[in-house]
């Protein structure tokens, strides 16, 4: 259990004994070295996420300083994920309605059809797995939004949009370097122009725009949140795909994975036991008593979703939503779609003979403070 702290746990080879220990022995504590309060049990995680004074951004800093004043910062500041209070509630209603309107069985067929038009470009399994994890789910969300995907003369779908989305997502990370932030600004501009000019009338974006108009949400904010759906789908779903491939590599189950039901069940289990989003943060907007402790305005809480998932004292109800999707006001509205997208991506990789056991040879995790996303090393490196 040689895990240094809850941030190092995110990318540790096996952080779960450490998380279980924290949940059992220090369910809510202050980590002086990190300068953060830490919620580590199912009960404390739920309490923090439900507390009205626990906000998704520090009050004085709605946009991270590195992004502020750039097109990336403008997009960031409009996202439902990054907003609280009345603007959040209005946007969340629009987003929830849009997600509820997705016909999942029809979406499954569309993703499979899209997958059929993504060629295998490299013989190396690791390369293909890395590429697909970050492209197919995002392309599918773009397609559902009614945005046009480019195709080449052979009918192969271009992955360009997914590249811009991944670039923007990387710029949002606290680990982003100045060059990443600069690239994120370019990506934000490209995505805003492209999505703003190309939405098809029958797609989700058009439906969201209509609902937003009725709710007095301005068009730029609505557009940002349509792009936000692709951004939310990017890293977390890539992590769910990758962690499922790791599980398959370890258990050697892929031989029996005949039908998609099995893959979807496996994905649901991985979302609980090796979750892609391991933590989230909250910032106190007022002095408050939280989990029996006195917190001050501006204090930050690291909310260990992955520890809640492994808390032995938590109720083991298989119908419960996996903790990795959060809970409360900011809970993920895309969880069902995320599981479907991850399952189809895994299924497609297996159909293209990607062998999960071979992927384990070069397994690392992408540097991240909150997302557990495998990075498979191609064999020629
Ligand atoms: C495995 C994939 C995914 C995981 C693990 C995940 C996880 C999460 C988590 C933990 C949050 C809440 C963060 C917080 O409370 O601080 C969240 C919010 C959100 N997610 Fe997901 N997500 C995934 C995929 C998706 C997809 C595919 C979509 C949509 C297409 C989506 C849309 C959103 C949106 C719009 C929010 C903001 C909700 C709000 O702030 O009220 N997510 N997600």
Image: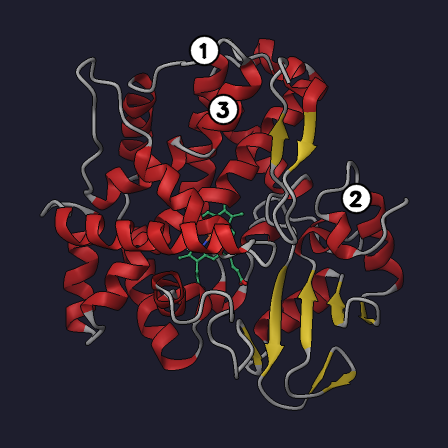
User: Relative to 342, does residue 61 appear above or below in the rendering?
Assistant: below
Residue at the image point whose x is 69% and y is 65% from the top: 302
**Mark 1 sits on what residue?**
352
| Alpha-carbon span between mark 3 and mark 1 | 10 Å
Q: Position of residue 198 (x, y in %)?
A: 14, 46
Cα separation, mark 3 vs mark 2, equals: 24 Å
What residue is shown at x 68% (from left), y 71% (from top)? 301
Report the residue marked by disc 3. Answer: 346
- Name the residue furthest bottom: 287
The answer to the question of whether label 1 and label 2 lie on touching residues, with beta carbons closer than 8 A, is no
Q: Earlier in the sequence, mark 1 or mark 2?
A: 2
Image coordinates for residue 155, horizontal then vertical, percent: 20, 17
Q: Do the numbered discs 3 and 2 sit on residues whose CB atoms are within 8 Å? A: no
Q: Are marks 3 and 1 in contact (CB under 8 Å)?
A: no
Q: Please give the label number shown on residue 15.
A: 2
Mark 2 residue element: loop
Given residues 286 and 97, the one toward you in this image is 286
Under tag 3, what secondary structure? Answer: helix
Cα gap from disc 1 to disc 2, whole angstroms: 31 Å
Q: Is residue 334 visible?
A: no
Q: Nearer the viewer, residue 265 or 270?
A: 270
């Amino acid at each position: 259990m040689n895990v240094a702290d809850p941030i190092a746990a995110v990318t540790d080879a096996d952080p779960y004994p450490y998380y279980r220990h924290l949940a059992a022995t220090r369910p809510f504590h202050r980590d002086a070295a990190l300068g953060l309060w830490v919620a580590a049990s199912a009960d404390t995680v739920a309490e923090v996420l439900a507390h009205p004074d626990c906000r998704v951004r520090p009050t004085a800093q709605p946009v991270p300083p590195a992004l502020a004043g750039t097109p990336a910062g403008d997009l960031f500041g409009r996202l439902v994920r990054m907003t609280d209070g009345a603007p959040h509630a209005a946007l969340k209603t629009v987003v929830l309605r849009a997600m509820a309107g997705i016909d999942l069985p029809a979406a499954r067929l569309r993703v499979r059809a899209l997958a059929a038009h993504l060629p295998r470009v490299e013989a190396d399994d690791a390369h293909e797995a890395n590429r697909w994890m970050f492209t197919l789910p995002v392309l599918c969300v773009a397609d559902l939004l009614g945005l046009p995907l480019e195709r080449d003369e052979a009918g192969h779908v271009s992955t360009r949009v997914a590249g811009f989305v991944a670039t923007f997502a990387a710029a949002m990370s606290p680990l982003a370097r100045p060059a990443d932030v600069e690239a994120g600004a370019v990506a934000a501009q490209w995505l805003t122009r492209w999505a703003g000019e190309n939405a098809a009338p029958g797609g989700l974006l058009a439906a969201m725009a209509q609902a937003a108009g009725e709710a007095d949400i301005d068009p730029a904010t609505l557009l940002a949140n349509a792009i936000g759906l692709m951004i939310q789908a990017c890293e977390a779903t890539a992590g769910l795909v990758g962690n499922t491939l790791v599980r398959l590599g370890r258990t050697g189950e892929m031989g029996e994975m005949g039908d998609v039901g099995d893959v979807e069940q496996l994905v649901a289990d991985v979302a609980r036991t090796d979750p892609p989003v391991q933590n989230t943060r909250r910032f106190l907007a007022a002095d408050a008593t939280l989990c029996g402790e006195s917190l001050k305005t501006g204090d930050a809480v690291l909310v260990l979703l992955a520890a809640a998932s492994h808390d032995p004292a938590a109720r083991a109800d298989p119908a419960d939503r996996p903790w990795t999707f959060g809970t409360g006001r900011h809970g993920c509205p895309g969880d069902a779609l995320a599981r479907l997208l991850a399952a189809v991506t895994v299924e497609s990789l297996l159909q293209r003979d990607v062998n999960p056991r071979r992927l384990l040879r070069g397994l690392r995790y992408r540097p991240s403070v909150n997302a557990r996303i495998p990075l498979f090393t191609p064999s020629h490196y």
